[in-house]
Image (cartoon, helix red, strand yellow):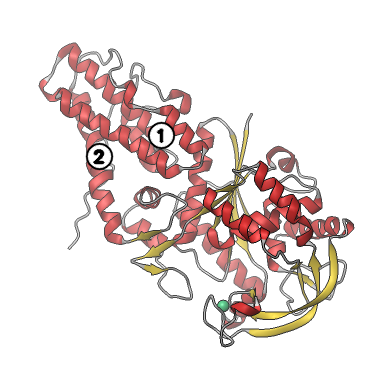
Amino acid sequence: MEKFYVTTPIYYVTAKPHLGHAFATIVADILARWNRILGKEVFFLTGTDEHGTKIEKAAREAGKTPKEFVDEVANMYMGAWKALDISYDKFIRTTDEEHEKAVSEFVRLVWDNKDIYKGVYEGWYCVPDETFIADFEVKDGKCPECGRDVQRVKEDAYFFALSSYKEDLLRIFEENPDFVKPNSRLNEIVKILKGTLRDLDITRKSVTWGIPFEPDKEQTVYVWFDALINYISALGWPNGSKFTEFWPADVHIVGKEISRFHAVIWPAMLLSAGIDLPKTILVHGWWTVEGKKMGKSLGNAVNPIDLSKKYSVDALRYFLVKEKSIWEDGDFSESGLVSRINGELLADLGNLVARVLTLAEKFKGKIDGKAEIADNLNMSRIMELFDGYDINGALNEIWAFVRSINKYINDTEPWKLDGPRLGTVLNNSLEALRIISILLYPFMPSTSESMQAQLGIKLGTINDCKFGTFNGKVKRGKNLFDKIVTA
Ligand SMILES: [Zn+2]
């Protein structure tokens, strides 16, 4: 059976799940569900990143031990993903014992390959961002990211010989133009690589909330080096059978702020350890909310769970994918969400299902007849868009099909028909709804389920997305979507 392995970033537990996290996780869920109905065996990984000074600090401020603190926030993420219908196969935490063991083993391999050496780290450090900042980026002693004071740090540290992988990485990017998607992000990464690539400090003496660095127990492994290894430790690397089955990953979904870690540092680490590279790093764009940048420190994070309760999980999932292409930035607004619910989910889909099922329930004749609208569905285009991870393009293509069925109903006016002609129009319309229920499954799983319940059918696979004779048992249920009335 063909395999598909998709990952989200593991989220750093100083922030509660916000819309940005929800977006990346929903994108991964859509790819996982799509590949399941393609008939592949899927492994979908998400989780939390739980080490480092920022977490020690956040725990202290909350009056908790780091362990109590990370347990609480990890539970919050699991709850959020349950609420948003996220069908992950594994939730990894970097404080899991199997992960910590894998990190030590990874360090051993890189050490044995002589890619780790001792040096002195000196530089500016932003504690809340947990980021070392280059001298030229610091302005008036402030962090360029958050504007807070930076600290001068000087201590013994171990370095990973990242710079020695520069040529290998450039060659890999050249040979695999899809290694980073979209292409514009790949070009940025290549530009960074062609500049000065410095070795990476991978341990900290001053950080205690981390995985011990085995070659020198006074040090802990730097949080980024630790975190990236989750993608293989979750599969039970080095000995787990899941690792043999699912690695290399088909796609790591990451935000653009962490693309450098995934496209430069992670592949170099894998090269050093002698492990195959992932196939694609998919870099998504950012969301602003009502025109403002999102984030905990800016205090305007919208809560995706509240939104999903107020509207519906599926409406939120639909909006986030329909509103923009995944690699571009976009703006979230509640009015935009409402307008897509009323103008698309209800007007195009909900009403269509209600109209067709009402007619079909009343009709006493035989529902069959030749396919008249098979050409409205461009399956090969949908497959191609999914293959290129353009799920916004795929949803647009599916929606064009939904709209074409509305047009078919308006053109044929089945409410004026009877007999075999009505049987044919109903057969085409019901078959179209059945196919739509399969195609929308990755995006809106409960809407898809509700359509199938009303059509009296079971979820099929992609192979079932072709017109035939409808053989469900129609029973109209409650409306898929209700009109949102705003004051
Ligand atoms: Zn900062």
In the picture of the structure, the residue carrying the numbered disc 1 is: 439
Task: Tell me, yes or no, if residue 93 can be seen here.
Answer: no
Name the kind of residue labelled 1 in the image: Leu
Q: Is mark 1 within 8 Å of ligand 1?
A: no
Q: Is residue 271 left or right of residue 2?
A: right
Ligand 1 within 8 Å of the CB at mark 2:
no
Quick one: 380 or 165, which is closer to the camera? Answer: 165
Label 2 element class: helix
The mark that comes first in sequence, 2 or 1, is 2
Measuring 74% from the left and 56% from the top, which residue is drawn there? Answer: 166
318 relative to 218, above or below? above
Check if mark 2's residue and mark 1's residue have beta carbons within 8 Å.
no
Q: Is residue 165 left or right of residue 419?
A: right
Q: Is residue 238 left or right of residue 277?
A: right
Residue 280 vertical position relative to residue 472 in the rendered view, above or below:
below
Q: Which residue is mark 2?
A: 348
Is residue 407 or residue 360 the one in the foreground? 407
Q: Residues within 10 Å of mark 2 (few under 14, many from 20)?
A: some
Image-quadrant location for residue 111: bottom right
- Amino acid type of disc 2? Asp
